[in-house]
């Protein structure tokens, strides 16, 4: 498995070695797996209101990407 990054959009994908060899070129470049792992975090912000004013709750979730 190899990780590739789209130079134009910044999208990071994880593909098989064979597919990576076919895809890598001008638009896609090889990147370390740690960069792919860094893109899997999803952060949500909930804004609520109480009598004192508004407050924010930040939640971080890790989602696993499925590569084909």
Image (tube, rainbow, N blue to C red):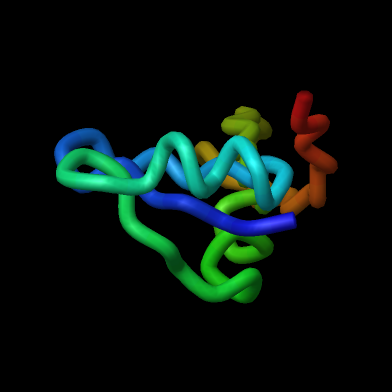
Point out the image quarter for the C terminus.
top right
Residue 6 lies in quadrant: top left
Residue at x-position 47% and y-position 51%:
4
Q: Would you say residue 55 is visible in this rendering?
A: no
Foreground: 46 or 65? 65
Exactly how many numbered labels are in the figure?
0
Q: Nearer the viewer, residue 49 or 65?
A: 65
Q: Residue furthest top?
A: 68
Q: Residue at x 82, y 31 (%)?
A: 66
Q: Answer yes or no: is residue 19 visible.
A: yes
Residue 60 in percent (x, y) is at 73, 53
Q: Nearer the viewer, residue 56 or 43?
A: 43
Measuring from the top left, give residue 34's x and y in whole percent: 62, 75
In the rendered image of this protein, does residue 68 appear above or below residue 37? above
Where residue 32 appears, x then y in whole percent? 54, 75
Identified at 80% across, 48% down, the residue is 61
Is 7 on the left or on the right of 18, as rendered? Answer: left
Q: Position of residue 40 (x, y in %)?
A: 67, 49
Q: Is residue 61 left or right of residue 18?
A: right
Which residue is at 57% across, 56% downward? 3
Q: Is residue 58 above or below residue 47?
A: below
Quadrant of the frame with the N terminus: bottom right
């Amino acid at each position: 498995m190899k990780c590739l990054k789209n130079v134009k959009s910044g999208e990071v994908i994880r593909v098989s070695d064979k597919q990576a060899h076919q895809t890598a070129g001008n638009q896609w470049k090889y990147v370390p797996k740690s960069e792919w792992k860094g893109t899997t975090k999803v952060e949500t912000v909930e804004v609520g209101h109480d009598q004192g004013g508004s407050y924010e709750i930040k939640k971080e979730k890790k989602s696993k990407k499925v590569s084909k």
